[in-house]
Image (cartoon, grey):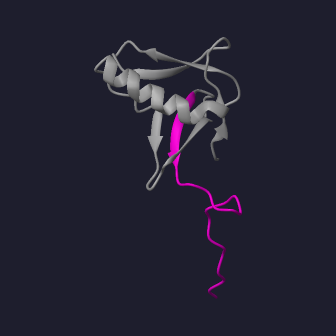
Amino acid sequence: MGSKTFEGNVSIVLNTKGEIALKRDPEGDWDASKAQALHVKMGELAKKHKAKISSYALFQAEGGTEPVLLANRYGNPYVALLPKRGEGGTTRKGVTKLA
């Protein structure tokens, strides 16, 4: 099961563990179209509050540079840094029949 783009708005919060996290918020300022700015703001707030970003709020794939706001299997938001997609819209290689 793949992750889906998060539908709705989120807010950046400081959770009970003292970590920067994301929370669903209908009145939040951030949505999937602002994922790049959201990622930058999370980093700024982490430095300002001397906190780390929650591992549930940020996922970085190998070679990932493009921030995308996704929903986990429970519907909670997180930012994923994914490799930049090519012109075809996919990063998967074609299937090669071997036998």
Image x and y of residue 59, in percent: 46, 40
Residue nearest the viewer, comparing 86 with 54: 86
Give, as a single range, the part of the protein colored magenta.
77-99
Q: How many marks?
A: 0
Extreme bottom residue here? 99
Residue 14 seen in the figure? yes
Q: Is residue 57 visible?
A: no
Rendering quarter of residue 37: top right
The picture quadrant where one finds residue 84 is bottom right
Q: In the image, 17: left or right of 93?
A: left
State the quadrant of the C terminus: bottom right
Q: Looking at the image, which residue is at 41% across and 15% down? A: 15
**Could you tell me what secondary structure mostly forms the magenta stretch?**
loop
Q: Which residue sits at x=70%, y=58%?
A: 89
Residues 23 and 97: in front is: 23
The residue at 63%/28% (across/down) is 75
Q: Nearer the viewer, residue 84 or 99?
A: 84
Task: Judge left or right: residue 77 versus residue 55.
Answer: right
Coordinates of residue 31 in the picture (x, y in percent): 65, 27
Where does residue 11 sit, x and y in percent of width and height? Answer: 55, 17
Residue 80 is inside the magenta segment: yes
Decide whether residue 83 is among the magenta residues: yes
Image coords of residue 42 (percent x, y): 44, 26
Tell me the residue at 71%/29% (across/down).
7
Above or below: residue 58 compared with residue 63? above
- In this view, the residue farthest toward the left is 50
Residue 24 vs 85, above or below: the answer is above
